[in-house]
Amino acid sequence: GRIVIAAAKKYKANAIGVELDDALVVKSKAKIYALGLDKTARIIRGDLMEQDYSSADLVTVYLWPEANEKVARLLEQQLKKGARVVAHDFPMDDWTPSATITIPDDGTGRSHTLYVYIR
């Protein structure tokens, strides 16, 4: 729920996260409620491959390359023109990013790469 929470908190976004793990759903919902973000942030328990992304303006993914390949096919079918996709650390299959952002240190000594796509 960290990305959902950050989007709702920092950008006032209507943010929805999809999580398969029950314990993480409970933990994320509790954090959202504790922060008073329950009007703009929510976590749904479900399979990310069974969701409807057709109304999304922005989709963020932090998945292994094999999962990115699968979700890329789904997003190609569902996303509206101009929707953005941000992939964390692993690119989206054969898509060409419109921007690549390198974060040299996330505060814990780890570096990250963000791949930004516009459909």
Image (cartoon, rainbow, N blue to C red):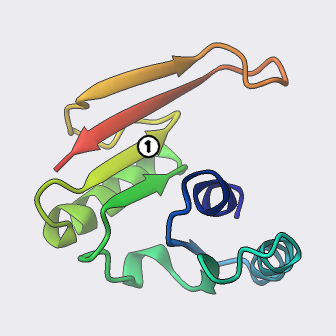
Query: Relative to residue 81, is residue 114 drawn left or right?
Result: right
Please say whether residue 67 is visible from this viewpoint. no
In percent of width and height, residue 71 lies at 35, 62
Please say whether residue 20 is visible from this viewpoint. yes
Q: Residues within 10 Å of mark 1 (few under 14, many from 20)?
A: many
- Above/below status of 50 relative to 65: below
Query: Relative to residue 32, is residue 114 drawn left or right?
Result: left
Question: Quadrant of the image for the N terminus?
Answer: bottom right
In percent of width and height, residue 73 lies at 22, 61
Residue at image point 46% right, 74% down = 48
**Viewer-nearest residue: 15 or 65:** 15
Pointer 1 residue:
87
In percent of width and height, residue 70 lies at 33, 60
In percent of width and height, residue 115 lies at 39, 33
Residue at image point 70% right, 82% down = 38
Identify the secondary structure beneath mark 1. Answer: strand
Q: Quadrant of residue 46?
A: bottom right
- Above/below status of 104 relative to 15: above
Question: Looking at this rendering, what residue extends furthest in the top direction?
Answer: 104
Instruction: Give the mark count.
Output: 1
Residue at image point 30% right, 25% down = 99
Amino acid residing under circle 1:
Ala
Q: Quadrant of residue 41?
A: bottom right
Residue at image point 31% right, 75% down = 53
Q: Quadrant of residue 50?
A: bottom left
Query: Relative to residue 60, is residue 99 drawn left or right?
Result: left
